[in-house]
Every structure is written in structure tokens, then in C-alpha cells.
Image: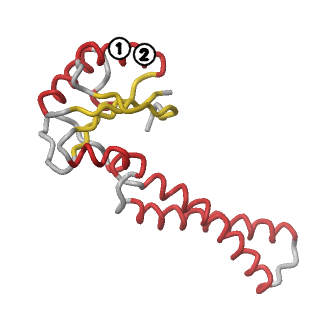
């Protein structure tokens, strides 16, 4: 498992220096992402992905839960309408209706979530609008303390802003 560390950097030179130090510490570039408040990032700094910038994942999770409930209710309603006699067919019909509800809910809600900024990053909005750059780096759980100490020593201008555990190894 990986942990996502959040840091606020004051400017582009600090972001480039931090990127170089993370690469020298053997953190792969695919685990390092930057997010700015509006100004475009230069091509040498990897920007945050769609899933990191928006609420796609949260929207899909909420849509799956709501879709499962609505699919189950729709299945019950359709069972009364079609009067199916076999208990096995009733169960299969209910499972199918629930799965359709889950899939539709996930799809519809993730489309909505793609248009919204990531709610987990709302705490950083003020600093990002002032020109700071957010660094999101996913590190192996065994190296968190080592990398926090390295970054604190090498970059006193950056501010540690939190840690999020349980980031999947293969996103």
C-alpha cells in the first residue's frame, strides 16, 4: 500500500527542486503529481490526473450505492408487474435489476463528478489561488518517515499539509 503525502510549495523553482529530490530518492515520476491554482504547469512537472483533480471516484461510489438501492426497488416493482412464479427466476431478476442500477448509478454519477473539483482538495483552494503549487506524492508505506524527513531537511520553504493512507499500489 502507498500513502499520499500533500505539500504546498511556494513557486515553480521549489517544485522543480522537490521533483528532482524525489526522483533521486527513487520515487518514480508516475507517483509524483503537481496541481496549481490556475496557471498552467510547465511540461517538465507532471500535472494531476483527471481522477485526482475531480470528484469522479467519489461520484461513482455514491452513484453505485444509490443505484443499488434504486435498482433493488425497481426490481421489486417489476416483480409485482410481471408475476414471475419461480423463486429462482425472482432472485435472478432482483440481482440483475440491482446490477443494472449499480452500473447506471456509477456511470451517471461519475459523469457529474467529473465536472466538480475534488472535494478532498478543497482545503488547499485558498493557497492555490494565491499562487502556491500542491505536490501529491504517493510513497510506499515503509518509506513515509524517511521521505518526510528528507523533504523537511532539503526544502524548509515547503509546508507539509497532510497524509492520506490506503492509496492502491496499482491505480
The way the protein has been coloured in the rendering is: secondary structure
Question: Is residue 106 left or right of 51 when viewed as pictured?
Answer: right
Question: Is residue 170 left or right of 151 when viewed as pictured?
Answer: right
Instruction: State yes or no: discs 1 and 2 in contact (Cβ < 8 Å).
Output: yes
Secondary structure state at the residue bearing disc 2: helix
Mark 1 → mark 2, Cα distance in angstroms: 6 Å
Name above or below for residue 93 compared with residue 55: below
Secondary structure state at the residue bearing disc 1: helix
Using the image, tell me which numbered label, if any, was put on residue 149: 1
Question: Is residue 7 left or right of 70 when viewed as pictured?
Answer: left
Q: Residues within 10 Å of mark 2 (few under 14, many from 20)?
A: few
Viewer-side residue, 71 vs 163: 163
Query: Could you say where residue 50 lies in the image, as x and y percent from the top left?
Result: 32, 50
Where residue 22 sits, quadrant-wise, is top left
Residue plotted at (19% across, 21% down):
20
Using the image, tell me which numbered label, if any, was put on residue 159: none
Residue plotted at (41% across, 32% down):
162
Residue plotted at (76% across, 66% down):
92
Where residue 47 sits, quadrant-wise, is top left
Query: Could you say where residue 155 lies in the image, as x and y percent from the top left?
Result: 23, 19
Residue plotted at (42% across, 55% down):
56
Query: Could you say where residue 73 lies in the image, as x and y percent from the top left?
Result: 71, 73
Q: Residues within 10 Å of mark 1 (few under 14, many from 20)?
A: few
Question: Is residue 62 left or right of 112 when viewed as pictured?
Answer: right
Q: Which residue is mark 2?
A: 145
Query: Could you say where residue 5 lies in the image, as x and y percent from the top left?
Result: 38, 30
Name above or below for residue 22 compared with residue 73: above
**Which quadrant does the C terminus fall into?**
top left
Amino acid at each position: 500500500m502507498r500513502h499520499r503525502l500533500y505539500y504546498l510549495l511556494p513557486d515553480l523553482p521549489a517544485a522543480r527542486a522537490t521533483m528532482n529530490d524525489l526522483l533521486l530518492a527513487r520515487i518514480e515520476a508516475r507517483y509524483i503529481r503537481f496541481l496549481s491554482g490556475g496557471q498552467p504547469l510547465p511540461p517538465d512537472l507532471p500535472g494531476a490526473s483527471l481522477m485526482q483533480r475531480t470528484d469522479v471516484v467519489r461520484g461513482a461510489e455514491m452513484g453505485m450505492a444509490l443505484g443499488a438501492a434504486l435498482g433493488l426497488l425497481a426490481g421489486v416493482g417489476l416483480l409485482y408487474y410481471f408475476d414471475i412464479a419461480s423463486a429462482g427466476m425472482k432472485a435472478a431478476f432482483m440481482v440483475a435489476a440491482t446490477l443494472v442500477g449499480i452500473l447506471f448509478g456509477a456511470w451517471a454519477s461519475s459523469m457529474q463528478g467529473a465536472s466538480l473539483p475534488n472535494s478532498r482538495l478543497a482545503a488547499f483552494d485558498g493557497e492555490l489561488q494565491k499562487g502556491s503549487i500542491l505536490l501529491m506524492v504517493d510513497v510506499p508505506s515503509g518509506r513515509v518517515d524517511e521521505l518526510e524527513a528528507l523533504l523537511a531537511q532539503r526544502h524548509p520553504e515547503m509546508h507539509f499539509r497532510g497524509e492520506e493512507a490506503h492509496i492502491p499500489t496499482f491505480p
